[in-house]
């Protein structure tokens, strides 16, 4: 297997204190987060409701780190431009969230942003076959999307399959995993080929004073 590149940690602000989100993002930045992961849910595509582009815009001044925005919304197309303007650096969509998956990726990249594809536990990797030239990140979900704090679903073969597909392109494409990630499950997904790990509860559980420790533990350092 081709070894994965440098491991990056993307704490999910879904698990942050929403009463002080700006401070939380600043604390994550200082603690060594590589990306700030923003979970956007619409109560339609997934059974939860979170934030919109206005919150992303408000948070943008609090960190220069990459804003990794995961759109769990349907339809996604009407909101792509707003999230791009708000300060998203990566915009990740689900293939099931709109009728023209390929076109949506084109729109994201046309706005100067990196385009991501999220694969639910029941989504086959074959959906990537004809879009890899437009993809900058593949997100493998190790929980069903919608809520934080869920139990990890082990899919190392799926992660390894995506890593092989990425290697075949010869391009630098992130392989991100999200769902139940902690220092123990991180070892499995890194071994399978992931290089970006999204973690919520495992980062935030003990407050800002421990963020750096938890990020370091998940990274394997």
Image (spheres, rainbow, N blue to C red):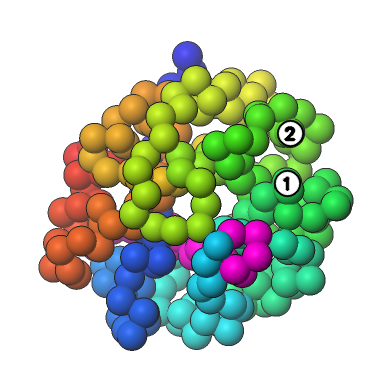
Query: Is residue 110 left or right of 196 when viewed as pictured?
Result: right
Which residue lies at the image location 46% right of the left edge and 80% below the top edge? Answer: 59
- Where's residue 28, x and y in %? 30, 66
54 relative to 174, above or below: below
Q: Is residue 47 visible?
A: yes
- SS for tag 2? helix
Q: Quadrant of the C terminus?
A: top left
Which residue lies at the image location 23% right of the left edge and 40% below the top edge? Answer: 183
Which residue lies at the image location 65% right of the left edge and 29% below the top edge? Answer: 125
* Res 151 label: none
Query: Is residue 86 left or right of 205 when viewed as pictured?
Result: right
- Where's residue 143, x and y in %? 46, 44
Report the front residue among 55 and 34.
55
97 relative to 79, above or below: above
Q: Number of labelled discs?
A: 2
**Image marks 2 and 1: residues in contact by CB distance under 8 Å:** yes
- Where's residue 108, x and y in %? 74, 59
Task: Please name the residue that numbered disc 1 is placed on.
Answer: 95
- SS for tag 1? helix
Report the front residue among 107 and 150.
150
- Where's residue 55, x and y in %? 52, 81
Magenta stretch encompasses residue 44: yes
What stretch of residues is rendered in magenta?
31-46
Report the front residue among 124 and 110.
124
Task: Please name the residue that numbered disc 2 is placed on.
Answer: 127
């Amino acid at each position: 297997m081709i070894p994965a590149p440098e491991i990056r940690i993307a704490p999910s602000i879904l698990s942050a204190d929403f009463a002080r989100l700006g401070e939380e993002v600043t604390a994550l930045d200082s603690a060594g987060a590589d990306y700030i992961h923003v979970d956007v849910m619409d109560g339609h595509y997934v059974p939860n409701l979170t934030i919109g582009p206005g919150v992303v815009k408000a948070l943008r001044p609090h960190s220069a780190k990459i804003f990794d925005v995961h759109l769990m919304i349907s339809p996604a197309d009407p909101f792509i431009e707003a999230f791009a303007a708000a300060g998203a650096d990566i915009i990740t969509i689900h293939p099931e969230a709109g009728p023209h998956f390929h076109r949506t990726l084109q729109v994201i990249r046309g706005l100067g942003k990196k385009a991501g594809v999220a694969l639910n536990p029941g989504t086959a990797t074959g959906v990537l076959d004809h879009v890899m030239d437009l993809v900058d990140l593949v997100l493998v979900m190790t929980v069903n999307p919608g809520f934080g704090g869920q139990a990890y679903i082990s899919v190392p073969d799926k992660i390894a399959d995506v890593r092989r597909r990425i290697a075949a392109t010869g391009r630098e494409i992130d392989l991100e995993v999200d769902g139940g990630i902690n220092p123990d499950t991180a070892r499995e997904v890194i071994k399978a080929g992931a290089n970006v790990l999204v973690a919520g509860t495992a980062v935030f559980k003990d407050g800002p004073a421990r963020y750096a420790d938890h990020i370091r533990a998940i990274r394997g350092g």
